[in-house]
Amino acid sequence: MQPEDTNYLKGRGAQFNPKNRFLKNQQIRSEIESIDDWSEPNPATVYLEDNAKSIVNKVDSPDVGMFYSMNPYQGCEHGCIYCYARNAHEYWGYSAGLDFERKIIVKKNAPELLRKFLMNKNWECVPISLSGNTDCYQPAEKKFRLSRGILEVCNEFNQPLGIITKNAGILRDTDLLQQLAKKKLVSVLVSITSFDEDLRRAMEPRTTTAKQRLRVIKELSEVGVRAGVMLGPMIPGLNEHEMQRIMEAASENGASFSAYTFIRLNGAIKLIFHDWLYKNFPDRADKVWHLIENGHGGKVNDSRWGVRMRGEGPISDLVRQQFRKYTKLYNLIDERWELDCTQFRRPGEQGKLF
């Protein structure tokens, strides 16, 4: 249940804008009781169209399970309170809090940039992750259709890609996904964190229900698209006890592989999550906070490669053991990146002769 406080912004995850670490001067409201001239930020979502210079980024982190990523949108209206991508919004001059959910940067030339990238003779084909940062099927996609444009380019070049989403809007592109799947060029990872609708509405306020996400897995797998389930993040005291139920349901609906992450609260996310937790779950907030600390060696954040996504200590070890057990039990062990890179070719190129 969300708080009955009339000042609580329903439909949003973050409840304020924490300071941007890169900006020296910012206007903030330091005291609720202050009587100086102050106006709250516009509560509506704003789309900021941008002519980006690039769309594909090399991923140097060795523990994220991808080689390159592309994100047609920066910021995400889904408003997931735990999202690690929030911190990246500060690079654009905005806050990781409400700004991340309400000021969505739209890279309107994303499909053209991808085409230009793939035409480069130096590109040696490996899978690219669509939504390595923010969700490519967030509400903005219904208007701008950039993700569909990217799929069309990938289909033309036979460029393999992996997609991560928690939005049923991906089903609008079933036709293209099926074409890519026939050539073994796509896999889809659907994020499911809870079957508790009260928790989902508070934690991921503008996302679709877990039931709808299972429908995504089912409908895609039925037309031959490799689909898996992402349990991320697992938060002790809130949703980690649902791991088995989620993995079992995903398997029953056609999922063939899985992944998970353990909650970590880096940068401004620590402040945003702490505020959200104590407002929404005051009865167990202390317990949850301490469990997260126990999962990271006494801290709630960790930036070390190989450790940050899984945590360390008895709590995170327990989550890891459960994941391994249920992965085998429900046969969710297929390789996510089992995609064919040999078919890639630029328009006009002759097929390779062997």
Image (cartoon, grey):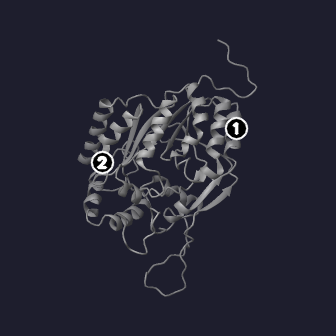
Secondary structure at badge 2 equals helix
The one nearer the camera, 142 or 75, is: 142
Residue 134 % position (x, y): 53, 50
Give the residue number, with chain letter if any, for mark 1: 115
Please give the label number shown on residue 259: none
The one nearer the camera, 230 or 63, is: 230
Q: Residue furthest bottom?
A: 35
Residue 283 % position (x, y): 26, 65
Residue 129 % position (x, y): 54, 39
- Side of 89 relative to 195 (left or right): right
Q: Is residue 246 visible?
A: yes
- Side of 187 relative to 313 (left or right): right
**Which residue does the image show at 53% across and 27% down from the upper left?**
339
- Side of 40 relative to 323 (left or right): right
Relative vertical location of residue 38 with respect to residue 13 in this rendering, above or below? below
Spatial distance from mark 1 to mark 2, Cα to Cα?
A: 41 Å
- Side of 312 relative to 168 (left or right): left
